[in-house]
Amino acid sequence: MSTRRLNLLIKQSKRRFDIMAISVKGGEAKPQIQIDDGLHYGVIKTIEERPVEGKDYTYLDLYLEVEKEGEPLELKVGFALPNKGVGLNEKQDLGKLVIRVTGNPIEPGKDYDLDQILVGKRVQFVTLTGEKYVEVTKESVKPAVEKVVSTEGKVPDLGGN
């Protein structure tokens, strides 16, 4: 290789390095969401597919809106989407959620429009506060069941546990 060609490659390489400089602006940390542990009611506002870097699977994130002291508060819970070639089924957390919301078993070969099934649904769920974040337990997400109160102001015994 000629010296001239080698010098040209070195110059090009230096320019590439300059272009790859990365800069970010400073910002403020978001405060940790403050919400009591326990049962909450809300609405699934949106869903979003989220790839997991370096993995061959993706998550479906549900964004839940709850009211706290009259102000909307958004929480997120993720469900693994089925891998390519594997359909939605009742053993997956997402499949269990679809069954809870629709009230029907998963049918092999049937297409499920998750936007139509989930978005806008009123749900109940349980939160637990971790060291750094609030966790919505995915097993607890289900259609909201409002408390039934009798005309005498008492909660009726509906049987069961």
Image (cartoon, rainbow, N blue to C red):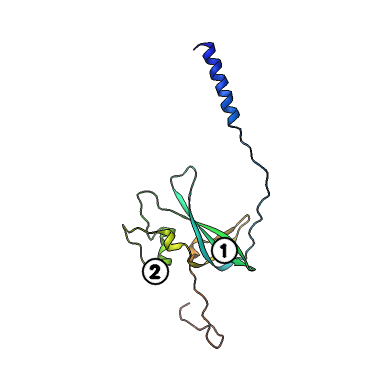
Q: What is the quadrant of residue 69 in the picture? A: bottom right
The first of marks 1 and 2 along the sequence is 2
Q: Residue at x 43, y 66 (%)?
A: 101
| Figure label count | 2
Give the distance between the C-alpha atoms of the residues marked 1 and 2, in whole angstroms.
Answer: 23 Å
Kindly identify which residue carries mark 2.
Answer: 103
Image location of residue 139, percent across then percent down: 48, 63
Q: Residue at x 32, y 59 (%)?
A: 110
Image location of residue 125, percent across then percent down: 52, 66
Name the residue nearer the viewer: 62 or 55. Answer: 62
Name the residue nearer the viewer: 37 or 118. Answer: 118
Which element type, helix, strand or loop, lies under badge 1?
strand
Please say if 113 is above or below 15.
below
Q: Residue furthest left?
A: 109
Q: Which mark is residue 39?
A: none
Kindly identify which residue carries mark 1.
Answer: 127
Which amino acid, by three-letter code, is at mark 1?
Thr
Image location of residue 98, percent across then percent down: 41, 63
Q: Residue at x 43, y 53 (%)?
A: 81
Please say if 125 is above or below 57.
below
**35 with respect to 123 (left or right):** right
**25 with respect to 93 (left or right):** right
